[in-house]
Amino acid sequence: MKIKQNVAVPALLFLILFGCSANNGTNPGSQSADNDNHVEFTKFDKTASDDFIDQDAANEAKKVLSKFEDIKAIKAVNTKKYLLVAVQVHHNKRFQLDDLEKKYSKVLKKKFPKYQTKLSTDQKLWVELNELEQAINDNKISNNKLEKQVKHMIKLSKEQT
Amino acid sequence: MADNKKKNLPPEAQRYQAMQKKQETKRPVFKNCIKAFLIGGLICLIGQFISMFYIYYFDFTEQTAGNPTTATLIFITMLLTGFGIYDRIGQFAGAGAAVPVTGFGNSVISAAIEHRPEGFVLGVGGNMFKLAGSVIAIGVFSAFIIALIKTILIQWGWL
């Protein structure tokens, strides 16, 4: 009886700890665009107002980054000067977060030399960019406000303490 | 070391120790580990919720949300210690309640409460870091050493 208990309890603990192992498969997002890797990202349509900053660079950045297997979702917004990207990586890859951030930042800098690019894996930037994307898609934001928001986000991303 | 001490004991004392060992109730080490794991994990989960709250509702990034989260956890611990709840949690969870930052907060606050009758300055002020002082001192010293090593490695181009 005691032997059974000595085997069963560690086995149960082992199952609890390692049962929920990382899922290496990709999960297709509800908003996924036409991409090979099932990476979740929204694609900007042409906005109704002609004078609004076009989001071609942001769309292109999403396309470029969606080729990487570690990324599961991307949010991106651009102004005339800045390109801001937030990515979510698969949970088992979070240990290499710094390296991945550097790697993708290099890719973006190479691809978009005209823009000041900023890539982040930070949750805050993800939330803010998600709201911005929705506002752009719903035509609820002006150029000035977009510029302000992006500058504010870049300032946030530079904060250390 | 302990065995050598036992060998040096007179035979009667050795017999007594053997008998005492039989009578002693064994510490449920595995059960204690599980308790510590679960309660410690629960405290960390609450901390994560607080951190996400600051990220979503205030201008904090993942990196900057750490400070207010820690402050909030210590504030909650202060209240729980004052009402005598954290001591019970500590008795139940052991290391699970002592290892997170809440354990550090508890050690400061409980010492402050204990020495309150001796006055604010000499009582609370003089004794509140009796337990936590060693943690702060070693923490600061370790951080200094690590920073020094990192600086040297960066200067030599190894990092």
Image: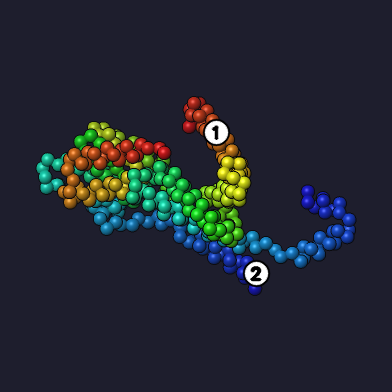
Task: Return the mark for residue B78.
Answer: none
Task: Return the mark for residue B144.
Answer: 1
Image x and y of residue A75, in percent:
28, 47
Residue B37 position by quadrant: bottom right
Q: Secondary structure at mark 1?
A: helix
Mark 2 lies on residue: A3
Q: Are marks 2 and 1 on the same chain?
A: no
What's the residue at 23%, 45% (across, down)? A59
Rounded to the nearest whole Å, what is the CA distance between mark 2 and mark 1?
49 Å
Q: Secondary structure at mark 2?
A: helix
What's the residue at 26%, 49% (across, down)? A131
Left or right position of B58 against B81? left
What's the residue at 48%, 53% (across, down)? B76
Q: Give the residue type at disc 1.
A: Phe
Left or right position of B90 against A148? right
Image x and y of residue A46, in percent:
14, 47
What's the residue at 53%, 55% (across, down)? B82
Mark 2, residues whose alpha carbon is within 10 Å: few (<14), some, or many (≥20)?
few
Q: Which mark's residue is nearer the viewer, 2 or 1?
A: 1
Q: Nearer the viewer, residue B28 or A28?
A: B28
Mark 1, residues whose alpha carbon is within 10 Å: few (<14), some, or many (≥20)?
few
Image x and y of residue B134, in percent:
61, 41
Q: Is residue B76 visible?
A: yes
Left or right position of A135 against B78? left
